[in-house]
Image: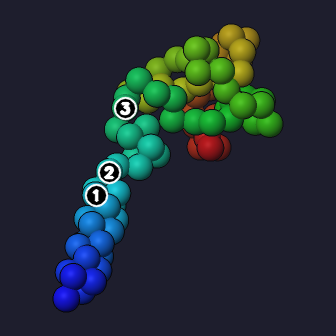
Amino acid sequence: MRHLVLALLLLTACGAVVLAAQDKPLAADAAKKDPSKPVNKFCPIEKENEVDPKVTTTYEDKVIAFCCADCIAKFKADPKKYMKDLK
C-alpha cells in the first residue's frame, strides 16, 4: 500500500512540474512583446551581417537594428525598400 501511495505522489509531482513549465512564456514571445528590442536579427542593408542591438532606429513604432551606423542612413533614404526583407 505504501508503494502505491508513493508512486501516486511521484506521478502527481511530475505532472505538476510539467504543467508549471508549460505556463511560462517562451523567450521568443517575450521579445515580441518588448517594444524596446529590435524586430530583426540581420541587418536590413547588409543582409548577411547580424545586428548590433545598440545600433538602432525606430520606424513605424518598431525598433530596427543594424550592423553599423552607416546602414542607418541608407535605411532612412528608402525604408520601405528594406522593411519588406527584414528577418
**Distance Cα–Cα, label 2 vs label 1:** 7 Å
> Between residues 40 and 17, which one lies in front from this camera angle?
17
Residue 41 place in picture, x, y as percent? 63, 36
Badge 3 element: loop
Picture quarter with the C terminus: top right
Vertical placement of residue 64 versus 31, above or below:
above
* Image marks 3 and 1: residues in contact by CB distance under 8 Å: no
Vertical placement of residue 34 versus 22, above or below:
above
* Image marks 2 and 1: residues in contact by CB distance under 8 Å: yes
Residue 77 place in picture, x, y as percent? 63, 19
Could you tell me if residue 32 is visible in this image?
no
Badge 1 element: helix
Residue at the spot 80% in from the left edge and 36% down from the top edge? 48
Q: Earlier in the sequence, mark 2 or mark 3?
A: 2
Residue 20's mark? Answer: 1
Q: Earlier in the sequence, mark 3 or mark 1?
A: 1
Q: Nearer the viewer, mark 2 or mark 1?
A: 1
- The reply, left or right, for residue 85 in relation to residue 13 is right
Vertical placement of residue 85 versus 8, above or below:
above
Residue 31 place in picture, x, y as percent? 43, 37
Per the image, the residue denoted by label 2 is 24
Vertical placement of residue 58 versus 47, above or below:
above
Residue 51 place in picture, x, y as percent? 67, 26
> Which image quadrant for residue 65?
top right
Per the image, the residue denoted by label 3 is 34
Residue at the spot 72% in from the left edge and 15% down from the top edge? 68
Number of residues whose C-alpha sits closer than 10 Å to that of mark 2, classed few (under 14), some (14–19) or many (20 or more):
few
Mark 1 residue type: Ala
Picture quarter with the N terminus: bottom left
Mark 2 residue type: Lys
